[in-house]
Structures are given as structure tokens and as C-alpha cells.
Amino acid sequence: MTSTKTNVFTDPRNGGRAVVTGATSGIGRAYAIALARLGYRLLVTGRRHSLLEAVAEEVRQAGAPTVDARVIELSDTSVVDALCSELARAADTEYLVNNAGFATGKPFFEDPNGNDRMNTVHIDVPMRLMYATVPGMERRGHGCVVNVASLAAYLAVPYASTYVASKAYLIALTECVSLEVDPSIVRIQALAPGYVHTDFHRDGLIPDRERRSRGLIRWSSPEAVVKHSLRCLEKNQVLSVPGALNRILLGVSRITPRSVLYATASRRLRRRYRP
Ligand SMILES: NC(=O)c1ccc[n+]([C@@H]2O[C@H](COP(=O)([O-])OP(=O)(O)OC[C@H]3O[C@@H](n4cnc5c(N)ncnc54)[C@H](OP(=O)(O)O)[C@@H]3O)[C@@H](O)[C@H]2O)c1
């Protein structure tokens, strides 16, 4: 099914390719399907082979002219080297979604290797994929980059130190780089969702019973997140925070004294890990 709606900026031009990392589930899967509907050729990555095959089929059904599904461990530098060389040579990427990410819920001092791996996947890989694709976008005269960060980047969260820090880095990087490109040619976005129903919280990271909207805390769908991201790119908004209540939370977090944030935002998490 192809889209009947024409978007001025986010539609593909000249048969461009979209690259979505971490497309086996959640936001990446929803983004790949949305871009297929817009008519992009797709390159999707993930590690869970059977899910990746299923998403490739969904993307084909959604209208992508071609689908290239790659099983890639993004913390493997040599594999990422090869992918970046290939993308730079082809210079046909028009849409890049740096989406792959994970959390561990482990104490900072107990997981040095995990922290390194997270920085690689959340920071190094997005940077390297941007180096590999943005010059080609500039030559083609059109391109979009979405770096999927998190609203958590604005908070202080125990047992998520590298997660919060890497996402804050990604937001700052994206905002600065967006000022170095011509937005009539390339638009770069930091997408900072709040809680989203995906596979991210599997393995008990957030218990099932707590995965529901209450008070100011809202859970959204991956599709709603993607819709907001696309709308923000059309409006050339560099920071995309889906959900009105999440934007209020962001505003509140910016004016709340850090000492109050430390005391309140982390209390529940501390209780969970150190009952
Ligand atoms: N869900 C939320 O509440 C939430 C909130 C804010 C931000 N985010 C961000 O949104 C992004 C997408 O997450 P999601 O919520 O959609 O979770 P998800 O359903 O778990 O999807 C994460 C994707 O990233 C891939 N991935 C993770 N680590 C990888 C690695 N080392 N190498 C290769 N691929 C890897 C996964 O691949 P495999 O599973 O196939 O290995 C999967 O496709 C992440 O960057 C996350 O930080 C999520």
C-alpha cells in the first residue's frame, strides 16, 4: 500500500533508500513500515533473525520497492565498518533512522563492558552512519536523519547512567550538527520519546504491571512516535518529543532544581533495585 498523502520533505526523491537500524520490533519496525508506505527502498537491521524476516515481509507488503534485511550486531566494529563503507560508496541513502538501542538496568560499576557496548551502539554507530550517509544526501540534494534518543536524557536515573548519558550526548550532537547542515537539503532530528510499548522493557526492565499510563506518565505506541517524528521533520523541528504530557514533563524537568529531580525521579527506581 503506498501513501496517498504527499509530504513535502519526508517523501523519497529519485528512488532513495532508507536505512533503519534496530527494525526487528518497536519504534524501528514502525518506522520501517511508515517509510515503506512513503515509497522508500529499505535496508533494515536487527539481530533476531526470524523477527527481521517477518518485518521484511511487512515492509514489502507496505509498499517498499526493495527490502534488504541484515542481521547485524552493531557493537561489532568490523561489521559496522563494512556497512559504512558500502553505504558511503552507494551514496543512495535518503533517510537514516539511528534507532537501535537497549538498556540493562545494571549498576554502573558492575558493568564496564556493557557500558562500553552501549556507548558504541548509542553514540559511535549513529555518528559513523551519519558520516557514511549525510555527504551523499547533500550531493543528492535531499535527506533526513533521525537519531532516536530518549526523554530520560533530561533526567537523572540510577541504574541507567550510561543509557541517560549516551542519549543526552546523542541529543546534543544532533542539535549541534543540525546547525551545520542546510535544512532545505538535509534535516536532522533528535527523537526523544517517553515510555513506548515495545520489546525494550522485556526481561523485567519495567515490570508488566507498571507498563501503563498514570498521572503525568503516558505510554504511547511506536506508530504514534513515528507519526510525530515525521511531522516534526516536515516542520523542521530538530527536537521531537512525542506526546503533549511528555513535552510538559520536559518543560518541568528544565526548570526543576536538580536536587529535587534527584530526590523524586529516582526514588521509585532505588526502591526497585535496593528494596
Ligand atoms: N520503549 C521505550 O520506552 C523507549 C523510550 C525512549 C527511547 N527509546 C529508544 O527507542 C529505540 C528503539 O527501542 P524500542 O523501544 O523500539 O525497543 P525494542 O523493541 O527492544 O527495539 C530495539 C531494537 O534495537 C536493536 N538492537 C539493540 N541492541 C542492538 C545491538 N547491540 N546490535 C544490533 N541491534 C540492536 C534490537 O535488535 P534485536 O532485538 O533484534 O537484537 C531491536 O531491533 C532505542 O534506541 C531506545 O533507547 C525507547
Image (cartoon, rainbow, N blue to C red):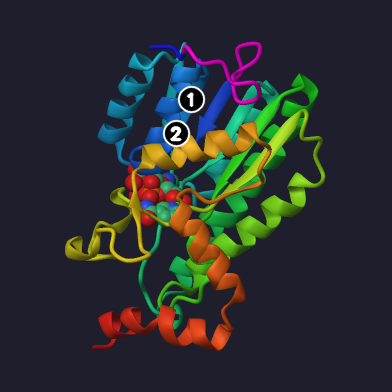
Q: Quadrant of residue 169?
A: bottom right
Most common SS among magenta residues: loop
Q: Secondary structure at mark 2?
A: helix
Is 15 on the left-hand or right-hand side of 175?
left
Residue at 58 percent across and 84 percent down: it is: 257
Residue 145, picture quadrant: top right
Residue 163 point in image, percent of width and height:
48, 65
Q: Amino acid at mark 2?
A: Tyr
Query: In the rendered structure, which amino acid carries the disc numbered 1?
Result: Leu
Q: Using the image, tell me which numbered label, if any, was put on residue 31.
A: 2
Magenta highlight range: 4-16
Residue 235 placement (x, y as % from top left):
65, 35
Disc 1 and disc 2: Cα gap in Å?
6 Å
Quick one: label 1, few (<14), some, or many (20+) residues within 10 Å?
many
Is residue 167 placed above or below 187 in the rendered structure?
below
User: Label 1, on which residue?
Assistant: 35
